[in-house]
Image: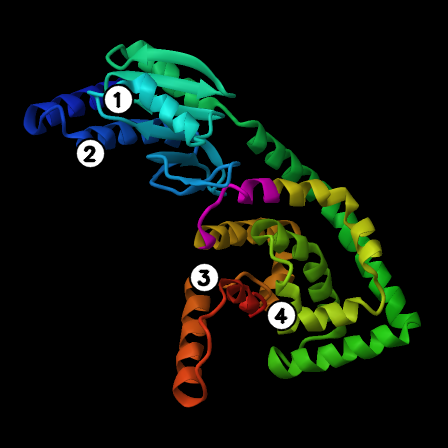
Amino acid sequence: MSKQIINSYYNQLHKIKQFGGSRNEGAISRAFAQLLNAYAEKRNLMLVEQVDIKTPKGNVIRPDGVVKNAMRLDFGFWEAKKGDVDLDKEIQLKIDKGYPLINILFEDSNRVVLYQENQKVLDVPLEDDKKLDEILTRFIEFEPLQIQKFNDALGKFKQDIPDIVKNLRELMTENAQTNKDYKVARDTFLALCQAEINPEIAAEDVREMMIQHILTEDIFNAVFDETGFHRENNIAKQLEAVIETFMTRTVRQNYLSHIKHYYQAIRDEASGIADHNEKQKFLKIIYEEFYKVYNPKGADRLGVVYTPNEIVRFMIESTDYLLEKHFVEIPQTNPCLMQSLIWI
């Protein structure tokens, strides 16, 4: 039992009630948040407060806290209520609003209630240190099925991606020798890259860019559910034009059939993210994981990395300002265009 952590919480709670009064809900809930985060940190997790969540019903909720890992995956939720309310009624109200019951703690500074897999599994008095440790430990150590599926998909992705990359390289090498349309389109794109990105880029580098584009297209679509990006982004359009000279959509999907579960796992996780900016941050982490598997040195050399959101936002807003000032008025920037600088 984390006796020292719990005793520290009890002492802090006593001082809050002594100096601020028992109705100081904000201070009392912050004390519990610190306690919960101390347990989370033991598993390399963190309690993040006030995060918008999109429920399967389509509405947006905001629990008092969400336990996440470094990949921003949700391990559990926490909801605090006032000590002078009927906690059971408050829990039912949250359930009716669509609060997820996969792994969630409800507490009111008197009781702590734990729901897992849509069932109430524990209901303990907060002043019982052993029971409090039990419920917090069970909450933190629980790994939702969706997280298990994601980790399993990521593991299989790491196993399958080397063979997929190898097969794509062989396919492009063969077409470079036998497919005139492919060679012309590739060389045209190569000249553009040499002029706009780096004069030392070679045909092999273009091949790698196309492979990365093929593999990451569904990652972007899984997070944003936005297929229009590859029709609007100039670099993406140029890459697609080259790819279409030797690969149909059906052939592409056949090559990627072994890692469809990975894209679906990403889609499942992204479906609960309500905020567009949070989706961009999640996409950044997914791209980083992708490049750990696929040729990170080559990606760094070519500059094929996910540009930080802040830099992209600055570049777009600066461009918007100059266009409005010196040319014509333009509509507000579509958030999806944030991704258009992904190849910079």
State the residue in front, 208 or 280: 280
Residue where numbered disc 1 is placed: 108
Residue type at mark 4?
Glu
Foreground: disc 1 or disc 3: 1
Residue where numbered disc 2 is placed: 26
State which region is magenta. Answer: 266-276
Foreground: disc 3 or disc 4: 4
Reply yes or no: does residue 273 show up in magenta.
Answer: yes
Q: What element carries label 3?
A: helix
Residue type at mark 1?
Asp
Label 2 vs 4, first from the N-terminus? 2
Residue type at mark 2?
Gly
Residue where numbered disc 4 is placed: 232
- The crowd level at tag 2 (other Cα within 10 Å; few <14, some 14-19, many 20+) is few
Residue where numbered disc 3 is placed: 309
Label 3 vs 4, first from the N-terminus? 4
